[in-house]
Amino acid sequence: MSLAAKNCFRTDGKRKGNAKGITNVLGAILFILAIVALTSIIAIVAAEYSSYVRSADYLSNLERERSSESLYFQYAAGNPLKLNITNTCGSSIKITQIVVHDKTSNSLVVNPIASIPIVLNPGMTEYNYSITGINTASSNATIMIITSRGNAFIIAVEGGKVLFRN
């Protein structure tokens, strides 16, 4: 037998090439596991990025709507103080709280009216909205109207007259 033929056989008479089959199977299994892991990672990253884009879009829309909110206040005669509140923006506004700081008695009243929340559609006016606790003839007060988007509109009343509104 030639030297090359002797090197192909082991001492037990079996060929050395039989070990190649097991190595090929293990390599194929590792390759499949790597492809599955890589595909899973790509799918998870894509889902998280999509979630991030949706939340960023939602927050951007919320900030745009918040910055466009606009209310107009007009004094309406009466005791207690009455205001006409008009929504002058293009989206609905939901008034969730009204806080009154009466500077004369140094008292703070939150939600003095039971009709909260007030929803105003674009162009809609709440007429003769009564602000209790403010005597129109003598009170000095600051009224803060808070919307559901977090905007605060401030009205300063001095001696029953509306001095400042934003």
Image (cartoon, helix red, strand yellow):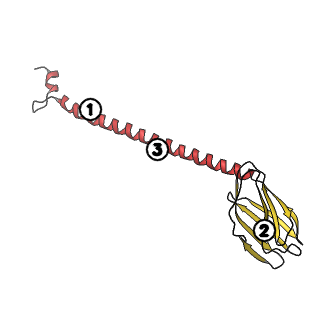
| Label 3 vs 2, first from the N-terminus | 3
Residue 44 badge: 3
Secondary structure at badge 3 equals helix
* Residue 165 seen: no
Residue 130 badge: 2
Which residue type does callout 1 highlight? Asn
Residue 24 badge: 1
Closest to the observer, 34 or 63 = 63
- Tell me which residue sits at (13%, 25%) in the image: 6
Relative image position of residue 43 (x, y in whole percent): 46, 41
Closest to the observer, 132 or 78 = 78
Which residue type does callout 2 highlight? Ser
Relative image position of residue 110 (x, y in whole percent): 71, 71
- Tell me which residue sits at (77%, 65%) in the image: 144
The answer to whether residue 71 is left or right of residue 15 is right
Real-space CA distance between mark 3 and mark 1, rounded to the nearest whole angstrom? 30 Å
Secondary structure at badge 2 equals strand
| Label 2 vs 1, first from the N-terminus | 1
Rendered image quadrant of residue 75: bottom right
Please, which residue is most extreme toward the bottom here? Answer: 105
* Residue 59 seen: yes
- Tell me which residue sits at (30%, 37%) in the image: 29
Real-space CA distance between mark 3 and mark 2, rounded to the nearest whole angstrom? 54 Å
Secondary structure at badge 1 equals helix
